[in-house]
Amino acid sequence: MNLPPFNYLEPLTLKEALSMLNKYRSRVKIVAGGTEITNHLKSKNLTPSFILTLRKISGLHGIKENKNEVVIGSYTTLKEIHNSSVIRKKFKSIADSANYVAAPPIQNRATVGGNILQNTRCMFYNQSEFFLKGLTPCYKRSGKVCHAVKGSKRCFSVYQGDMAPILIALDAKIILEKKGKARKLPLFDLFTGEGTGPFSIGNNELLTKIIIPIPKGNHSSAYEKMRVRGSLEYPFASVAVSLEMGKNGHLAKARVVIGAAGSSPKSIEETALYFTKTWPKESDIEIIGTHALEASEMVNNLSMPALYRRKMVKVLTKRAVKRALKDLKRGT
């Protein structure tokens, strides 16, 4: 499949990149590692006039540890995150989740910013141009139907990023920059929950940094992912867990986030009720798993049945919670 024609932009500085984004806006698409956008270009789901590469902008790259936080540049590759001594020491689950993405050749190119901002997916959308010509345009292709849920009035495409769930569980924030301005917001707030437009980011904005606060006390986290082939697939279900110990020996903070369960990651709000007063029992973990299952919004639009994926959300939640609790005990 041939790529559509486009003009190639290669800014040397962040200022230059933001100026280009401000000028071309909806006519330009950003390429970081290029592991996702290339497929969209081949299928003609994207036909931008301009492609802007970030590869020569040094300020978007690297991992730094400050006094109370770890800052990751959005162009930092997943392999660098997995190998980082800072990340492995402070947040091993982030290193693990980076290592779970595809195969090593992809990890060498894919960036954390690109993984966070990857588009939602659906078996009726992520297809060849030839296949799509035989389908009535769906919501995600600016149509008025959903092929996965007949009669639906909205898009059910699935967000399948690996990095966002664990970063959200760890209360990560992001920096979005545009010409002359910057804003900081929780990563969770980046997501709209809409399959057709999954991110609340302007077409002249650029994700430049991910900021992860370092917990003051003993803490642990875990990430679990279901896939068919260990080195290739996007997650069909995923769960991230973050726990933090309080001074009284009880859990002071707990958060469970599920991925690949809708058009955005979902935070299980009931988590704290069963974790922060006493050390959770097996029955508490079972309840949290049930809440995660109930929060899952899955339909038959991926290559694995929705019913099985929902059941596995509960299994993965219990598995991730137990692993995080085990690591927390080990650190006390």
Image (cartoon, rainbow, N blue to C red):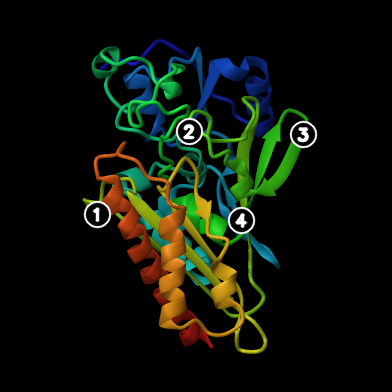
Which amino acid type is marked by label 1? Gly
Instruction: Tell me the quarter of the picture where residue 2 sits.
Output: top left
Q: Is residue 149 left or right of residue 60?
A: left
| Marker disc for residue 292 | none
Of marks 2 and 1, which one's residue comes earlier in the chain? 2
Task: Name the residue that disc number 4 marks.
Answer: 172
Say which of 144 and 51 sits in front: 144
Q: Is residue 108 left or right of residue 103?
A: right
Q: Secondary structure at mark 3?
A: strand
Q: CA distance from mark 3 to mark 4?
A: 20 Å
Q: Is residue 296 left or right of residue 123?
A: right
| Marker disc for residue 181 | 3
Of marks 1 and 4, which one's residue comes earlier in the chain? 4
Q: Secondary structure at mark 4?
A: loop
Which amino acid type is marked by label 2? Gly
Which residue ends up furthest to the right in the rendered image? 180
Dot 4, crowdedness within 10 Å: few (<14), some or many (≥20)? many
Q: Is residue 244 above or below residue 233?
A: below
| Marker disc for residue 230 | 1
Of marks 3 and 1, which one's residue comes earlier in the chain? 3
Of marks 3 and 2, which one's residue comes earlier in the chain? 3
